[in-house]
């Protein structure tokens, strides 16, 4: 019986037993020994009898035990059994006796001798149980993570399914999911770093995470071989990552500090849940891509995304990312990562395999200072946003001229926007704080504009020019001079968007005017905002002002101005023209505004030829 079948059979056997028998049965999977009597059989567990039995009746079991395999040359040789026993050290002698007792009982059970009557366990259930005891002792010659933790998995599964009678029948979605998980764990070679003390309850956590995720999904989804393969690969991949991580931090005694192993197990479980929950759709849509094993390392791309996220978290200092990720935010980041990787898989299969891990760390480090004022969920939001906006233009924002991963330039765009918006000078009149919803809106909008027209912001691949920072500082400085509280956080963001649209069309807006070296966008914003919201605007005029009309006028005006040299605007004429319009603003519609702007341009550029 293969490992997965044996584990499933053992779980089902335990579930069929009464409560008292089940307690004995589960205890024995944890190598808390049960004594099964052997009626009418002369069984003397001494070393001489053991050697004699393995040389004859028990010869078939030699290859199932590390101890027996080490003794195989002597057992198959010509030396007398008594001579072999005489040369055994105490440790080997005890291991030989333990093997003898287990395999002798298995042979008796196969021949029909009832061994578990006292605790109501039939032989069909007892034989797999004895094999699992051997695994737990470390006797398997081919040790895997599964074979060292099978007892814990069985214990956890019994606890889970005792509340859901019949859920683990052979064709149920839960049984198929457990099989996939077990097969993944069975592919992990057991090493000293994965001792039961180090690995803790991670296998049980993965089991419960699998069952809880599967319970939320339709049977046809979980029964799909692609989803089962996703479970298997994700379990295998993350367990390998944990083994590698533990091997890098074990002390001289081979132990992993308890706080680090607990942290690693916690994040492995969360990443595992996120992969099963959010990667399913992507995998179903393109299974050949996401489930195909890559050459180096032997992981599918779907699991490499999860590995990259786990690596980023574990390689940052404790607390730096721990507080900002949860199930929902991890799922969003992994979903966005899958989108990027689907279009540019070399981000995961390049030489150092660190492209995704690096950007997670980069976002964390560059934007960490904004978590306190904006909330702990801001970094996952920003990362999700950056990844999703990067997906269609990876080469421009994330790769160098040789196509190798480098710092993602959109991270700098986000940091620039946040730095300017969050900076409130001591002498500012308008001290309204830009609220989180409006910050999110402006970030999403700005990144989208950069994606659609990267030329206005990138001097060359990956290098951000200062235009965004210059424009934002100029516009926010003009806004901060106002003392009219009617200008809200949302109003300010809308005006900034209007200004950025113009700057994207014509970079003359961030050039200095010839008269006083003030940036063109700054000078024009000063005039317009003062004309609409300054102290000289009287109460009668204010009642005619509606912000959406002001915003519309500024948008149309700046769009038209982008056709000209913005540094040459006659600001005096512009000021007079806007003042003259104030009392008309209540009745202005879009068409009227456009006509007024055309007429104004004839005046403000009267002494200059249009550019």
Image (cartoon, rainbow, N blue to C red):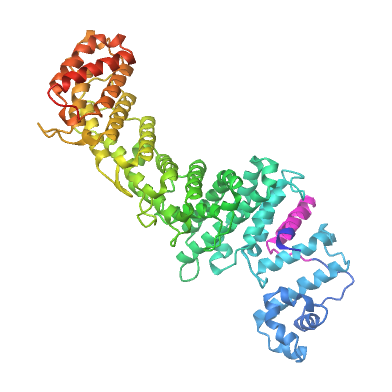
Q: Does the magenta segment cover residue 261?
A: no
Q: Which residue does the image show at 11% across and 33% down from the upper left? A: 514
Q: Which residue is at the far front? A: 609
Image quadrant of residue 595? Answer: top left
Looking at the picture, does residue 512 appear above or below residue 337? above
Between residue 241 and residue 572, name the one nearer to us. Answer: 572
| Position of residue 68 in the picture relative to residue 41 (left or right) | left
Image position of 503 with respect to 287: above or below: above
Whether residue 76 appears in this view of the structure is: yes
381 or 114, which is in the foreground?
A: 381
216 relative position to 566: left or right: right
At x 71%, y 83%, the residue is 72
Tell me how many marks there are: 0
Give the percent coordinates (x, y) of residue 95: 69, 76
Question: Along the horizontal axis of the image, is 207 left or right of 119?
Answer: left
- Image quadrant assignment for residue 232: bottom right
Which x, y percent locates residue 184?
63, 58
Q: Is 29 in the magenta?
A: yes
Span colored in magenta: 6-35
- Main SS of residues in magenta: helix
Which residue appears at 54% of the width and 46% of the height?
274
Q: Quadrant of the N terminus?
A: bottom right
Residue 336: give x, y in percent of width and height. Answer: 48, 44
Residue located farthest toward the left when viewing the structure as drawn:
515
Q: Tell which of 457 and 200 is nearer to you.
A: 457
At which x and y percent is residue 99?
Answer: 73, 74
Residue 427, can we see it?
A: no
The quadrant of the picture occupied by the C terminus is top left
């Amino acid at each position: 019986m293969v490992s997965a079948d044996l584990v499933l059979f053992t779980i089902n056997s335990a579930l069929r037993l009464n409560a008292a028998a089940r307690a004995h049965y589960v205890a024995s999977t944890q190598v808390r020994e049960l004594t099964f009597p052997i009626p009418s059989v002369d069984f003397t567990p001494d070393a001489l009898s053991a050697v004699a039995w393995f040389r004859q009746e028990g010869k078939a079991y030699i290859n199932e035990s590390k101890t027996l395999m080490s003794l195989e040359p002597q057992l198959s040789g010509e030396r007398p059994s008594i001579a072999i026993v005489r040369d055994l050290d105490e440790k080997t002698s005890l291991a030989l006796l333990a093997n003898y007792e287990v395999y002798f009982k298995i042979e008796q059970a196969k021949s029909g001798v009832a061994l578990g009557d006292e605790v109501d366990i039939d032989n069909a259930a007892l034989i797999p149980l004895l094999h699992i005891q051997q695994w737990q002792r470390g006797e398997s010659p081919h040790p895997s993570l599964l074979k060292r933790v099978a007892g814990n998995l069985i214990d956890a599964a019994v606890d889970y399914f005792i509340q859901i009678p019949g859920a683990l029948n052979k064709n149920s979605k839960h049984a198929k999911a457990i099989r996939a998980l077990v097969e993944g764990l069975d592919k992990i070679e057991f090493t000293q770093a994965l001792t039961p003390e180090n690995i803790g309850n991670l296998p049980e956590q993965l089991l419960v995470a699998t069952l809880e995720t599967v319970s939320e999904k339709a049977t046809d989804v979980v029964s799909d071989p692609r989803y089962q393969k996703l479970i298997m690969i994700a379990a295998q991949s993350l367990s390998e990552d944990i083994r590698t991580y533990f091997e890098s931090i074990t002390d001289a005694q081979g132990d992993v500090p308890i706080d680090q192993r607990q942290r690693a197990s916690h994040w492995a479980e969360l990443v595992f849940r996120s992969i099963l929950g959010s990667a399913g759709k992507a995998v179903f849509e393109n299974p050949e891509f996401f489930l195909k094993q890559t050459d180096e390392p032997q992981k599918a791309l779907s699991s490499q995304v999860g590995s990259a996220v786990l690596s980023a978290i574990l390689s940052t200092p404790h607390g730096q990312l721990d507080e900002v990720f949860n199930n929902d935010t991890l799922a969003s980041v992994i979903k966005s990562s899958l989108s990027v990787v689907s279009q540019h898989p070399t981000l995961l299969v390049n030489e150092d395999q660190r492209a995704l891990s690096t950007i997670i760390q980069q976002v964390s480090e560059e934007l960490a200072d904004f978590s306190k004022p904006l909330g702990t969920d801001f970094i996952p939001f920003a990362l999700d946003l950056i990844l999703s906006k990067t997906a269609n233009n990876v080469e421009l924002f994330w790769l160098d001229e040789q196509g190798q991963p480098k710092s993602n330039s959109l991270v700098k765009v986000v940091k620039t926007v946040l730095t300017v918006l969050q900076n409130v000078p001591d002498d500012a009149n308008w001290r309204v704080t830009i609220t989180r919803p409006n910050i999110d809106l402006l970030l999403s909008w700005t990144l989208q504009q950069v994606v659609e027209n990267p030329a206005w912001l990138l001097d060359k691949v990956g290098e951000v020019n200062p235009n965004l920072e210059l424009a934002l500082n100029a516009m926010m400085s003009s806004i901060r001079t106002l003392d009219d509280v009617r200008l809200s956080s949302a109003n300010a963001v809308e005006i900034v968007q209007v200004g950025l649209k113009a700057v994207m069309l014509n970079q003359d807006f961030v050039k200095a005017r010839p008269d006083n070296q003030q940036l063109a966008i700054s000078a024009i914003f000063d005039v317009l905002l003062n004309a609409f919201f300054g102290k000289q605007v009287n109460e009668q005029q204010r009642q005619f002002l509606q912000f959406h009309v002001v915003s519309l006028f500024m948008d149309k005006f700046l769009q038209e101005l982008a056709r000209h040299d913005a540094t040459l605007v006659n600001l005096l004429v512009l000021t007079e023209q806007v003042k003259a319009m104030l009392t008309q603003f209540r009745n202005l519609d879009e068409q009227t505004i456009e006509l007024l702007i055309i007429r104004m341009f004839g005046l403000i550029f009267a002494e200059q030829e249009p550019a």
